[in-house]
Image: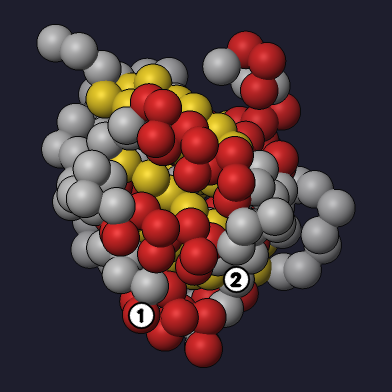
Amino acid sequence: MAKMRILLADSSSFCLDVEKWFLKESPVIIFTAEDGARAINLIRQVRPDLVYLEYALPVMDGVSCCRAIKADPDLAAIPVVMVAATDGAAVEECRDAGCDAVIVKPLNRREFLEVGRSFLGRINRREVRVPCRSSVVCRMEGNIFYGTIEDVSSNGMFVGATCAAREGDIIEMKFLLPGEASEVVTATARVAWVNGGRRRRNRNLPVGFGVVFQGLDTTAAERIQEFIEHTLIRQHPPDEW
């Protein structure tokens, strides 16, 4: 089966690296452009199956580029996902340009892939977890205990701890993620599974439990996503992709 072709157009090389990482497990061929003129030329040359197009591209802005795509009978059927830095007037401009979807920065892996899957079903949407060695303070039913974060995803984490947590328990958590930012992340989570006793479900993990975050606020979600993205980029530099 031939690989699908995706064009990523963004003025930030870092954002392009992040988007390429998002698509790393998907069976696609990726083309990139850092300005609108290059993007429209590539679109005409390679006829991608999907385009992610930044709003604020130099040379030829994303809105003008989108309009040019949708005005060309040979290109109009190509799905265009516009990427805007704000959710205000820029989003309305993107929609008025005829794009097929809009997402807002900072980029969120889940949203990026879910929108892509609505046009290309073969885009991979598996949840990515990264190792994270950090302490976490937990409160459950009025009791405070400490644990260690073993891994983290945008949806949850695994906590190494010897407390008697049960599936369905609600836990309040506070923790710091490694990196330059030192803000304490506060989250509420539900225990999804327990790894304990003689028959641990995953012997590669210590005694503890996996949790799913419940209604993360925007700041906490962005901090966790930023940590995941920076960790993966450090583990797999762009020249390895």
> Where does residue 34 sit, x and y in percent of width and height?
66, 43
Question: Where does residue 153 sit, x and y in percent of width and height?
Answer: 46, 46
Tell me what residue is drawn at x 85 percent, y 53 percent. Answer: 180
Looking at the picture, tell me which residue is in the foreground, 165 or 36: 36
Q: Residue at x 42, y 84 (%)?
A: 92
212 sits left or right of 172 in the view: left
Camera-nearest residue between 218 and 201:
218
Where residue 28 appears, as percent x and y from the top left, is: 33, 23
Task: Say above or below: 205 vs 157.
Answer: above
Return the x and y of residue 141 as percentages of the image width and height.
40, 77
**Amino acid type of the residue that numbered disc 2 sits on in the rendered structure:** Ala
From the viewer's perspective, tell me whether residue 182 is left or right of residue 229.
right
Q: Secondary structure at mark 1?
A: helix
Which amino acid type corresponds to the residue marked 1 in the rendered image? Asp
Number of marks present in the image shown: 2
Quadrant location of the N terminus in the rendered image: top left
Q: Which residue is mark 1?
A: 96
Q: Is residue 41 visible to the viewer in this orientation of the structure?
A: yes
Residue 85: mark = 2
Pointer 1 or 2: first along the chain = 2
SS class, disc 2: loop
Foreground: disc 1 or disc 2: 1
Asked whether residue 214 appears in the rendered view, the answer is: no
Q: Residue at x 38, y 26 (%)?
A: 46
Distance between mark 1 and mark 2 Cα atoms: 16 Å
